[in-house]
Image: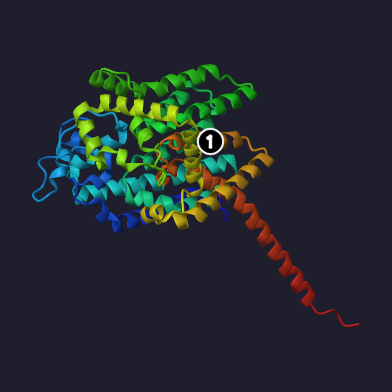
């Protein structure tokens, strides 16, 4: 698949448009799942939706488990706790919540119109990710692999499903992080400080969408510094400028948390995901009974203590668990890493009953992981400059989920780079097969040509 001179932009526009249509159609088909009124539309967007509803109703960045008003008539009395305000929160970062709150203000909180708009915006973020994917693959490989990567992403089933079903922050953070990576590749030869400041600000904004990107950003920055130092370009002042710029967008959120909680909190409270993701009960990769939203004693404790003290209790429980079961914690972490890359956790019937899609996911995820490894091998064999950048991204970006909750949805952040590596591995094989078939046809046609008469 080759692009003619000057046809790149319209071709990419068509790819983005197709990606958007495909994802949004799936979103409309799955729309009823987002409109379930149980617990005042808990399944609309879970904690993100609750905090956005609180912001939209002028109760501030609060109440991640609070449902507005009184429990509906005929509801289970035991669920009354789910209709109480629980106070200020730092359980989720602010940017996507603010976007969702704006949608609620304009189109109605938990309304059908808000669900349609939120899903459309989510699908748009996913579709636009095609552009940085093409840009990264074009720079790291060639334009043809860029186009193939874009097309694979368009039809990538996980991305279609998550973009169309969950208006969650991972879709926007995947787009922004891919733009950060693309701009980082440009920084290798950019000396203007204002360009570095722009990339730093963008990275800080991305961290406010999904704080897990902070696991990878230092390694991405270190890679570009190494490349500049190797080529004899200055790197210290540019990287310091970018680092300061990264911190600037985060400072107001940290200050807010200090004022509200009288405690230094960086971006979000991580201890509940640690607690939910680490349990002796290994039927699943998480123990949902540790979640306030599904366990009334936990909810009662959250309401009684307030979020800060509750999270301090969870922190103590997590650290005690690690001290008491160090070997189990290490093996569980390794199992979660395997699950993220293969889709395999268990074949136990009680597990598969709750996760029925795991059986088809295992061969799909495992195949893509193997192909990505082959892509890595090809990158290193060809000594491509970005090979270590890809290594650090795929090693660090998903790593926080190995210790907490390894939902396949969270792979949305790394799937673009897996797809590029898959394209890098598959395209040469397809070219070799095409060339082999072409040679066979030539030999066959030559053997069928009649010999001239004597």
Q: Is residue 115 above or below residue 222?
A: below
Display coloring: rainbow
Left or right of 321 on screen, residue 81:
left
Q: Total of numbered circles in the picture?
A: 1
The quadrant of the picture occupied by the C terminus is: bottom right
Q: Tell me the residue at 44%/36% (across/down).
A: 177
Residue 420 position in % (x across, y down): 54, 46
Residue 382 visible in image: no
For label 1, the SS is: helix
Residue 18 position in % (x across, y down): 41, 55
Which residue is the extreme one toward the left? Answer: 73
Q: Tell me the residue at 47%/41% (across/down).
A: 336
Question: Which residue, given by chain and number where applicable, does mark 1 sit on?
Answer: 395
Q: Residues within 10 Å of mark 1 (few under 14, many from 20)?
A: some
Residue 243 visible in image: yes
Q: Is residue 319 above or below residue 46?
A: above
Location of residue 109 by image quarter: top left
The quadrant of the picture occupied by the N terminus is: bottom right
Residue 396 position in % (x across, y down): 50, 33
Q: Tell me the residue at 54%/25% (across/down).
A: 222
Left or right of 287 on screen, residue 384:
right
Which residue is the extreme one toward the bottom? Answer: 453
Residue 31 position in % (x across, y down): 27, 55
Q: Tell me the residue at 27%/53% (across/down).
A: 33
Left or right of 141 on screen, residue 454:
right
Along the line of sight, the residue nearer the viewer: 368 or 351: 351
Along the line of sight, the residue nearer the viewer: 18 or 329: 329
Which residue is the extreme one toward the front? Answer: 324
């Amino acid at each position: 698949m080759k692009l003619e001179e000057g046809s790149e932009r319209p071709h990419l526009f068509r790819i983005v448009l197709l990606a958007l249509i495909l994802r949004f159609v799936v979103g409309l088909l799955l729309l009823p799942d987002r409109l379930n009124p149980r617990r005042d539309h808990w399944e609309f967007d879970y904690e993100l939706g609750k905090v956005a509803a609180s912001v939209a109703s002028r109760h501030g960045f609060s109440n991640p488990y609070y449902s507005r008003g009184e429990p509906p008539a005929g509801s289970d009395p035991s669920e009354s706790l789910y209709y109480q305000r629980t106070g200020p929160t730092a359980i989720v970062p602010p940017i996507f919540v603010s976007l969702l709150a704006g949608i609620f203000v304009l189109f109605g909180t938990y309304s059908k119109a808000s669900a349609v708009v939120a899903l459309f915006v989510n699908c748009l973020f996913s579709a636009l990710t095609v552009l940085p994917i093409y840009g990264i693959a074009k720079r790291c490989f060639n334009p043809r692999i860029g186009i193939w990567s874009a097309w694979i992403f368009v039809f990538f089933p996980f991305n279609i499903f998550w973009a169309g079903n969950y208006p969650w922050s991972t879709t926007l953070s995947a787009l922004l992080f891919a733009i950060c990576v693309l701009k980082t590749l440009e920084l290798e030869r950019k000396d203007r400080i204002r360009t570095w400041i722009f990339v730093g600000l963008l990275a800080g904004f991305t961290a406010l969408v999904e704080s897990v990107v902070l696991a990878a950003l230092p390694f991405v920055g270190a890679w570009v510094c190494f490349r500049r130092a190797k080529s004899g370009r200055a790197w210290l002042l540019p990287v310091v400028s970018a680092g300061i710029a990264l911190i600037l967008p985060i400072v107001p959120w940290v200050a807010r948390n200090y004022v509200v909680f009288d405690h230094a909190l960086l971006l979000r409270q991580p201890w509940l995901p640690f607690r939910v993701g680490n349990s002796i009960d290994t039927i699943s990769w998480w123990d949902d009974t540790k979640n306030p939203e599904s366990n009334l004693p936990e909810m009662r404790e959250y309401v009684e203590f307030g979020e800060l003290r509750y999270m301090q209790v969870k922190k103590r429980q997590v650290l005690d668990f690690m001290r008491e079961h160090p070997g189990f914690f290490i093996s569980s972490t390794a199992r979660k890493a395997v699950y993220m890359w293969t889709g395999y956790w268990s074949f136990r019937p009680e597990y598969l009953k709750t996760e029925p899609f795991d059986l088809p996911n295992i061969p799909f995820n495992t195949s893509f992981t193997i192909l990505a490894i082959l892509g890595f091998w090809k990158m290193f064999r060809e000594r491509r400059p970005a090979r270590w950048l890809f290594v650090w991204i795929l090693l660090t970006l998903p790593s926080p989920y190995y210790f907490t909750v390894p939902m396949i949805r969270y792979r949305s952040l790394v799937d673009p780079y897996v797809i590029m590596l898959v394209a890098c591995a598959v395209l040469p094989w397809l070219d070799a097969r095409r060339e082999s078939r072409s040679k066979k046809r030539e030999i066959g046609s030559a053997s069928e040509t009649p010999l001239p008469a004597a």
